[in-house]
Image (tube, helix red, strand yellow):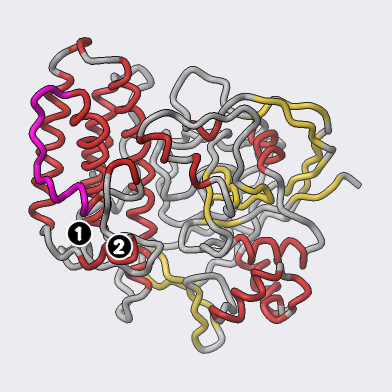
Amino acid sequence: MNLAASPRPEALPDACSLGERLFATRRFSLELTRGLTAEDMTVQAMDDASPTKWHLAHTSWFFEALVLAKYQKNYALFDESFNYCFNSYYESLGPRQPRPKRGLLTRPTIESVLAYHAHVDDGLRALFAKGNGFEPDAAAAIETGINHEQQHQELMLTDILALFAANPLRPAYRAPRPYQDLGAPKPLGWIPYEGGVYEAGYAGEDFCFDNETPRHRQFIHPFCLADRLVTNGEWQDFIADGGYHSFALWLSDGWAAVNREGWHAPLYWEERDGAWFTMTLEGLRPLEPKAPVAHVSYYEAHAFARWAGHRLPTEFEWEIAAGRSETDAQDPGLTALDPRPARSGGNGGPSQMFGELWQWTGSAYLPYPGYRAPVGALSEYNGKFMCGQQVLRGSSCATPIGHARKTYRNFFYPNQRWQFTGLRLASEVQ
């Protein structure tokens, strides 16, 4: 695959087998490292990010620890020390390298990590060689592993961006492409939605994460949702109007973060000779005013919404609106590594719901009514993080194909902004 053409794996037919999807996902993780040096893959930009080498090893460890060690008879561990090096947060599976110190793992080498990747793939192939003979629970664990690895593929890109943005040479992950002029910016419009009792949460037969269930009812007041994301140009107006200096706009913890961290613009923005630039996976580039603003925290999104006289949508308002989106969550044509401007026209539903930016909502990350965490090690996947974080909906320009749906609940702490996170506005019906 040519990374200069697409950051995403080839779209697979809906009817492809579990094994085909598994090994396509495993190959794509390797493709994402094309062009990176061993040094690029070892360094950790900050505590929230992880080295590329660690992501590669961790996704292999996930299959080794949660699939092969349990379901593949006579499977031989590649290296017993890897459980300490590449466990992430699974207390039930033993101690681990502290997250802020993953960048100190100069050993094992990238060559050893790639050998580990191949060893785990061999074990998975041996498991599939049994045909339909392996346990249904093994198939469920593999499906979770595929989706887990897709999450880390997105993290690989966002963490590479964090690393290259911290490098004074401002290297590019891929060669820059010329901007496509899409004409005049799309004016902000509002779409009304009726109130009432709505069903929320996942209701299909395919894979979903446990935090998307159970399906339940939510009472929704009438509301309006912006038909596109907030743009860089609109954020420039916020800055020019003193948005980062007006304490009245900010939550208390957000105002503390502004002063503690010295925030004065979104992450990766730089002002040079009176003009704004932004660091991207294609290097440092002039800021595109029509493109949606990215790399903002929940605190910043909340302050902007208050400045604009509106608010952030709840996660359930967002989910209702996603049913009328003019963007297909599985669109294989989304090949940009940066969020793109909204296009005029459409079917009357909101645009940019998927494939551009994860969108902050005003909803705390909490369990749905009746939620029960899975048993075993996977009980630690989502449920134990349901405190102190905010829900984001949609997907981003770095999200792999097939890893988006309207019920997907992403979640981050309100101060975090290294991910491809943006916002759209909501309002009460007047």
Q: Tag 2 or tag 1, which sits nearer the N-term?
A: 1
Three-letter code for the amino acid on which mark 1 is drawn: Gly
Horizontal side of 150 relative to 217 (left or right) equals left
Q: Residue at x 17, y 28 (%)?
A: 124
Mark 1 residue element: loop
Residue situated in front as seen by the camera: 142 or 8: 142
Residue placed furthest toward the bottom: 273
Label 1, label 2: how many angstroms apart (C-alpha)?
8 Å
Image vertical order of residue 349 relative to residue 204, above or below: below
Mark 2 residue element: loop
Question: Quadrant location of the N terminus?
Answer: top left
Residue 133 at x, y = what percent? 20, 10
Residue 104 at x, y = what percent? 22, 68
Tell me whether circle 1 and circle 2 mark residues in contact (CB < 8 Å): yes
Residue situated in front as seen by the camera: 185 or 268: 268
* In magenta segment, residue 84: yes
Pointer 1 residue: 35
Horizontal side of 136 relative to 268 (left or right) equals left
Q: Which residues are magenta?
A: 72-85
Determine the image quadrant of residue 301.
bottom right
Three-letter code for the amino acid on which mark 2 is drawn: Tyr
**Residue 328 seen in the current view:** no
Q: Residue at x 27, y 54 (%)?
A: 96
Horizontal side of 184 relative to 39 (left or right) equals right
Pointer 2 residue: 173
Q: Residue at x 35, y 41 (%)?
A: 150
